Amino acid sequence: MIITLRGAPGDDAWCTALRTDVAPLLLDTGAPGVTVNVRDAAVTDSLMTLTTLDPPVIALVSVWTPQYYGEQIHTATTLLGQICESTAAYLVTESVPLAGPVTAPGERTPGLANVALLRRPAGLDERTWLHRWHLDHTRVAIDTQSTFGYTQNTVVRAITDDAPPIDAIVEELFPIEATSDLHAFFGAADDADLSDRMTRMVASTTAFGANENVDTVPTSRYVLRDPFAAPAADDPTGRRDTLLR
């Protein structure tokens, strides 16, 4: 499950409180995984920011849970709804073509976590859209950018009322220099290389409609609990659940 937060103060004090005061309450519910992405001072001025939503998304909280309709998600939407103007929760399926680095619980993931909210064009059927995005575009995205972590979340459906239409939520990890340097963002050696990489990227995103009607949210990423980490030594069950995100 991914929950978007909009219309909050969004300053660094708010971002810190979200991940240090509010998010631990989600851990207390027993949720197997919780990650917080916040648009804080380290990344907020990213050159690659695109916004269609008003107010814009300034944070996202991912919760892994065995039941999308259970108490863990109810608690998450209730708590998060109290600290911002609006929340929207989306049930998603997750694909990870490029795993990012493992960090200690609550530690900031290195670099920029750029999150894109995608909408499928009305004239493109879902099967074709998924093929062009997953099978055609994935390799292009990895080859043309300085990405060192890549997660593709396909939205199954929204589970909160009045959620803005979103068909996919993509997270890509970049070096922190990518916030202000296009060469660093695309991993380009020079201007000619940058032009070539951007041309290939635009052609690929255009094929499945990700060149328009897109929000991109620069964030700092904090994994509070990794749902796929090995069980702790003091866990008597040694169990790893199959989870929905």
Image (spheres, rainbow, N blue to C red):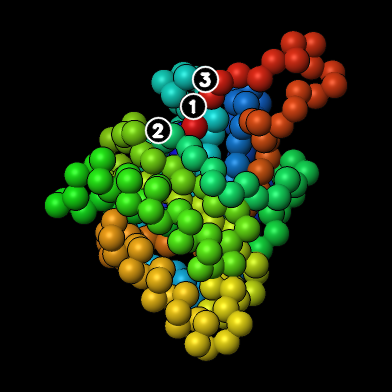
Q: Position of residue 161 (x, y in %)?
A: 28, 35
What number is the disc on residue 146?
A: none
State the residue position of label 1.
244
Left/right placement of residue 136 relative to residue 244 reads: left
C-alpha gap between disc 1 and disc 2: 8 Å
Reading the image, the residue beneath label 2 is 91
Which dot marks residue 66? 3
Q: Looking at numbered disc 3 in the image, what kind of residue is underneath it? A: Pro
- Label 3, label 1: how far apart the Cα atoms are: 6 Å
Q: Which amino acid lies under the numbered mark 1 shown in the image of this protein?
A: Leu
Give the CA separation, mark 3 to mark 2: 12 Å
Q: Residues within 10 Å of mark 2 (few under 14, many from 20)?
A: many
Kindly identify the residue that appears in the image at 38 percent across and 53 percent down: 136
Give the mark nearest the N terminus, 3 or 1: 3
Do labels 3 and 1 touch, CB within 8 Å? yes
50 in relation to 59, above or below = below
Which of the two discs, 3 and 2, labels the residue nearer the N terminus?
3
Mark 2 secondary-structure assignment = strand
Q: Nearer the viewer, residue 8 or 192?
A: 192
Using residue 234 as the reference point, say whether residue 144 is left or right of it. Answer: left
Assess whether mark 2 and mark 1 are in contact (beta carbons under 8 angstroms): yes
Residue 219 at what x, y percent from top left? 56, 59
Q: Which quadrant would residue 20 be assigned to in this image?
A: top right
Answer whether residue 16 is visible to the viewer in this image: yes
Contact flag, marks 3 and 2 (Cβ < 8 Å): no
First of labels 1, 2 by sequence position: 2
Dot 1: element: loop
